[in-house]
Amino acid sequence: MSKPPEYVGRFAPSPTGPLHFGSLLAAVASRLEARRRGGRWLLRIEDIDPPRERPGAARRIVEALERYGFEWDGPVLYQRHSETSHRAALQRLLAASLAYPCGCSRRDLLDAPAGPLGRIYPGTCRKGKGKGKSSNAPEFAVRVLTDNSQTGFVDRLQGAQSQRLESESGDFVVLRRDGLIAYQLAVVVDDYEQNVTDVVRGIDLMDSTPRQIWLQRLLGYPTPSYAHIPVATNAAGIKLSKNTGALAVPMEAVEPTLISALKALRQSPPDTLAKAGIGEIWEWSFAHWDLQKLRGFRQLKPGGQATRSVPCGEFTE
Ligand code: GLU
């Protein structure tokens, strides 16, 4: 029997803003799970979207992770350096007629039905870019062909998930009209090239997973295992994100914030840890981490004490 591949996990922030409490949770959970499984943990800065990037954010994210005592295996991967691999994967999809150029503008798609993942692409350019209303525009996107079979996976925390891509998202973009590689393709190529076996990340990305699995299948890549951790919300129940102006995690006296992260992740660190240094907090976490304490939860409030459980999928608490 062949040996199962070594566990490789990763944290992959986009430098569109500072490391905030919500992204700290994904960093802590992915690192601790990799550690508990005796695996490696990589840091990848997803800097392939310059229009959305904030100057200095990549450096500040790395500094914050260092300040909080994170240690990753190998050098930081800056995703823009893998552009050659991203473009090679795009060419493979095009050469195999699994993807096609699309001349439709956002305006052309205003009449398309809206689904939970955004506008559902009606397939206008499937039979040739000339069919798009804005086909004379110099820019075009590339979309990947989808069908209506169920694309599913069993999430380690959220249970069985599935989408019918053709009717739920339509053929989706792998090369944007502005010439940039789309997140869905970049993440799939980089997870493959870095031999990532296990993805632990925020539940806000769970909707993207079937599209990523779809691309993995087209490109002949293995599918990693996925665990989507609950999203952190503020006291008003609003998701903490760069879009909602979530604040950067503090850079001074970081220990209480790391302890809050562990509490939010439902790990119950003892009160005695309140006076501990960062190294000791990590040691406790390495010894006690249990991902399954998050099973079936979709939302968390910082501090853990006000956690609201929304059972979903096949799991209930
Ligand atoms: N870069 C993405 C983000 O910051 C996360 C990508 C991933 O974990 O797959 O939202």
Image (cartoon, rainbow, N blue to C red):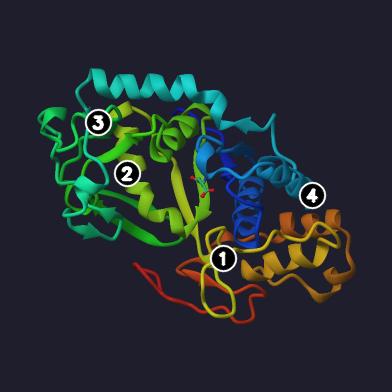
- Is label 2 in a helix, a strand or a loop? helix
- Which label's residue is closer to the chain start, 2 or 1? 2
Closer mark to the observer between disc 2 and disc 1? 1
The answer for how far apart the CA atoms under marks 4 and 2 are is 34 Å
Nearer-N-terminus badge (3/4): 4
- Label 2: which residue? 211
Where residue 231 appears, as percent x and y from the top left, is: 52, 65
Question: Residue 278 sits in which quadrant?
Answer: bottom right
Question: Label 2 vs label 3: CA separation?
Answer: 27 Å
The Cα–Cα distance between marks 2 and 1, rounded to whole angstroms, is 24 Å
Give the Cα distance between marks 1 and 3.
Answer: 38 Å
User: Which residue is more in the foreground, 65 or 115?
Assistant: 115
Foreground tag (4 vs 1): 1
Q: Which mark is residue 240?
A: 1
The residue shown at (52%, 52%) is: 201
Q: Identify the residue under disc 4.
A: 69
| In-image side of 251 versus 105 (left or right) | right
Of helix, strand and loop, which one carries label 3? loop
Q: Is residue 282 above or below residue 146?
A: below
Numbered label attached to residue 137 = 3
* Residue nearest the viewer, comparing 289 with 71: 71
Q: How far across and how far down the image is residue 42, in percent?
A: 63, 37
Q: Residues within 10 Å of mark 2 (few under 14, many from 20)?
A: many
